Amino acid sequence: MRTPTLTRRSALAGLTLPLFGGPARAQSPQTLEYVLGYPPGSAADAVGRMVADAMAKALDRAIVVTNKPGAGTTIAAQYVATARTPMLFNADFATLAAMPHLLARIPYDPDKDLAPISMLARVPLMLAVAPSAPARNLSEFVAWSRSTPGGVSYGSSGPGSPHHLAGELVKDLIGANMVHVPYRGGGPLLNDMVGGQIKAGMVDLASAKAFIAAGKIRGIAIASLQRAQALPDVATFHEQGFANFESSAWQAVVASPATPADLRVSFHAALHAALANPALKQRLESLGVETLPTTPEQMTSYTRAERARWGEIIRKHNIRID
């Protein structure tokens, strides 16, 4: 199954990047609030702060970053959806695609309460195993899973995460016998894979790259149509007989409904200028993160298609987090 298409030129997760930028400035009428649904110091928080810093320069305007972590970004989404002032929000896969299906009720409407600005970035997901696992490709993985009593346990960064949902889709797609084990984040999962406490996991390219390059875990298949420049030795699902299969963790930028149309246009231009910055672009892409700026209309089409795609998987496997 192929993900809704966005090319690098026409359009666009847990990332491990150092923070940079100065301290938050006191808010004023000219200060723009940039909301993140992740805790300070997290990988996704780092990406958001990098983008906010670059946008502040493009807008020639102070931007203060506000962290509203918790509940799969729904706390942050509600904060922005009910705001009475212009502000920006780093929405993601959870906010716009998964949470509307994972929760019986969410405190915002992803189509009406969050104004699309642009997709921001995506990073492909991959199936990986511990070095001691008896599998080096998908065929060997499937054979191993079917011969293991009770199936092979695979970890993800948490229930309802893109990693978890992709794992369930992969299980259906390749016919493997796999049992989900949720972790509280990708870091603990990768550490347990290195230690052999769990033999398989759905991980993302950005966080797993260094582990695979060092031989601490082994990439089995990456869910992109082409091999990643960051890990050219890891074959794609597409190459291994599962045509057009793609899956990624992604982020997008939205505005509060109180943001006037002319400001949304300015924010869109500033975000695209930030993503075109060679230093920022190179820093992200060297880690396997693809920047794919879009129009608001392209973003809406993509996120709605993703919501429909993953809604099917959530319903089929009866995945709930409430």
Image (spheres, rainbow, N blue to C red):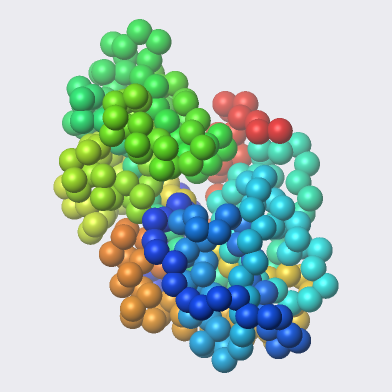
Give the quadrant of residue 121.
bottom left
Q: Quadrant of the N terminus?
A: top left
Residue at the image position 74 percent from the left and 77 percent from the top: 86
Q: Quadrant of the C terminus?
A: top right
Residue at the image position 62 percent from the left and 26 percent from the top: 318
Residue 230: image location, x then y, percent = 24, 57
In this picture, residue 7 sits left or right of residue 55: left
Residue at the image position 40 percent from the left and 10 percent from the top: 150
Q: Which of the pair 53/312 is nearer the observer? A: 53
Q: Quick check: can you spot residue 164?
A: no
Q: Which of the pair 24/91 is nearer the observer? A: 24
In this picture, residue 179 sits left or right of residue 143: right
| Total count of labels | 0
In this picture, residue 198 sits left or right of residue 253: left
In the displayed orientation, state which residue is furthest to the bottom: 60
Residue 192: image location, x then y, percent = 35, 31
Residue at the image position 28 percent from the left and 34 percent from the top: 194
Give the quadrant of residue 300.
bottom right
Residue 84: image location, x then y, percent = 83, 72
Q: Quick check: can you spot residue 83?
A: yes
Residue 122: image location, x then y, percent = 43, 58
Q: Which of the pair 181/297 is nearer the observer? A: 181
In the displayed orientation, state which residue is furthest to the top: 149
In the image, residue 41 above or below residue 156 = below
